[in-house]
Image: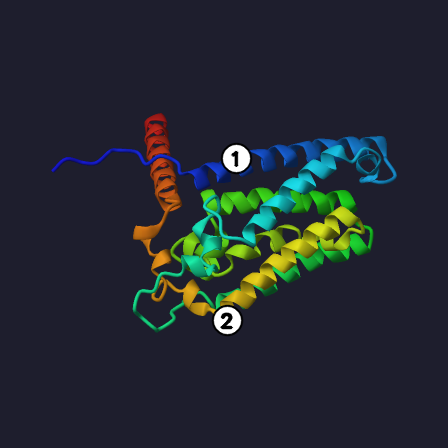
Amino acid sequence: MKRNNKKIKLTVVSTLHYARLVYRSILFVLLIAYYIYFRMTKGEKFLAPFEKIPVLLIIVWGIFVVEMIMRFFPSKYESPGCQKQFENNYIKTGNTEIIIPDNHATLLVALIWIVFNAIFGALHMNKIIDDGIMILLASFYSVCDMICILFFCPFQSWFMKNKCCSACRIYNWDYAMMFTPLFFINFRYSWSLLVLSVALMLRWEITFFRHPERFSENTNEYLQCKNCTEKLCTHKTQLKSLWKQIEKTTAKRIMKLKK
């Protein structure tokens, strides 16, 4: 029997995920560099330059706004994980039992996230950390969001236990979680991002409570592996295999050095 070594190409959706990872990472690095400069020059207000020359700020703000607005509508350029909420992606399996094994973990995830960010919020309100740190934290979250989708998701592995992103119960929480630190910054651009992200999450939750059958693989054939158009699990498997090979090679080299 011949082994199939054919590599699965990146889908359009997966390519867009990698593009988001790249520009969000670049943005995070630039913000770190600017923050260091800001601290060294002892500037009075972190956001002052952006208020005077808001072009870059508007571009970044606009990208995130467009990304969130797209989530409100069916789109072939979005992940199945967020598209399962729409009626046109509901394919009846014939089963009526709604099974969502990770549903009870949502409250725990929400509680942990609120407490974790409340600590930073308290530090900010007591002027131990400034607006710059909160913006850096939000930018860091945006990078982690793509890492969770493409490589490893602690929420999936440790709490939700869902099979993949397509079946994730809290997929559309990502922007609200990403922009949580902006709650503590009195700035119109930050608040608009936060409000829109919360609206996106509320729409998701309302749809879930009204149509839970769309979120269950047992009742919605759209969530079954045979209908997946993203194939991210394949890329994650390839990455895991590569990591194991690196570990084995490293272990062999260490053994040779010890001899």
Residue at 31%, 65% in the rendered image: 93
Write down the quadrant of residue 2 in the picture. Answer: top left
Residue at 33%, 51% in the rendered image: 227
Whichever of labels 1 and 2 marks the residue nearer the N terminus, that label is 1
Confirm or deny contact between disc 1 and disc 2 (CB under 8 A): no
Tell me where residue 163 appears, x and y as whole percent. Answer: 38, 56
User: Is 51 displayed left or right of 71 in the figure?
Assistant: right
Q: Would residue 49 be visible to someone looking at this image?
A: yes
Q: Nearest the camera: 142 or 132?
A: 142
Q: Work out which residue is located at the far bottom of the displayed protein and give it.
A: 97
User: Is 249 displayed left or right of 134 in the figure?
Assistant: left
Write down the quadrant of residue 248 in the picture. Answer: top left
Residue at 33%, 39% in the rendered image: 241
Q: Secondary structure at mark 2?
A: helix
Q: Quadrant of the N terminus?
A: top left
Residue underneath mark 1: 19
Tell me where residue 233 appears, x and y as whole percent. Answer: 37, 46
**Residue 250 — which label?**
none
Write down the quadrant of residue 119 in the picture. Answer: bottom right
Disc 1 from disc 2: Cα separation: 34 Å
Q: Amino acid at mark 2?
A: Arg
Q: Amino acid at mark 1?
A: Ala
Q: Quadrant of the C terminus?
A: top left
User: Is 219 displayed left or right of 114 in the figure?
Assistant: left
Residue at 61%, 47% in the rendered image: 141
Q: Nearer the viewer, mark 1 or mark 2?
A: 2
**Residue 210 — which label?**
2
Crowd around label 2: few <14 · some 14–19 · many ≥20 (10 Å): few
Q: Is residue 202 above or below residue 141?
A: below
